[in-house]
Image (cartoon, grey):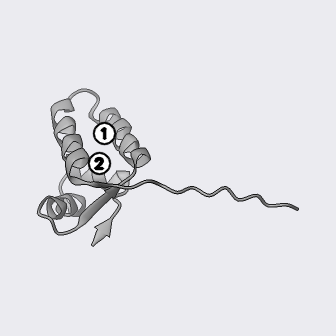
């Protein structure tokens, strides 16, 4: 299975227990493939460091390294649509 994790699920899984942490645990144990784009990864970085407020930077860095090394990066395709009225 291939999934994209919403940033809220990711943050909750790292900093708290519950279903989001179970999801991350399953990813670590190869139960699904995590898909990321550069834009999503950048959002993860910004959000995790904002939430940690410098207190848990080591934890954040460890997770970011895991995401960078063990996720499948894909390119996002954005199509511009022009609507003429």
Locate residue 85: give its quadrant: bottom right
Q: Is residue 25 left or right of residue 9?
A: left
| Extreme-left residue of the structure | 29
**Residue in view at x 37 percent, y 56 percent:** 6
Q: Which mark is residue 23?
A: none
Residue ID for mark 1: 48
**Residue in view at x 28 percent, y 60 percent:** 34
| Extreme-right residue of the structure | 85
Q: Position of residue 76 (x, y in %)?
A: 47, 55
Q: CA distance from mark 2 to mark 1?
A: 7 Å
Q: Are marks 2 and 1 in contact (CB under 8 Å)?
A: yes
Q: Position of residue 4 (x, y in %)?
A: 35, 61
| Extreme-bottom residue of the structure | 1
Residue ID for mark 2: 11
Query: Tag count in the figure?
Result: 2
Towards the viewer: 37 or 27 = 37
Q: SS for tag 1?
A: helix
């Amino acid at each position: 299975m291939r999934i994209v994790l919403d940033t809220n699920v990711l943050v909750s899984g790292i900093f708290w227990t519950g279903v989001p942490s179970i999801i991350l645990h399953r990813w670590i144990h190869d139960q699904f493939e995590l898909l990321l784009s550069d834009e999503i990864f950048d959002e993860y970085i910004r959000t995790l460091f904002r939430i940690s407020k410098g207190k848990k930077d080591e934890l954040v860095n460890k997770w970011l390294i895991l995401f960078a090394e063990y996720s499948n990066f894909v390119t996002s395709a954005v199509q511009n649509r022009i609507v003429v009225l």
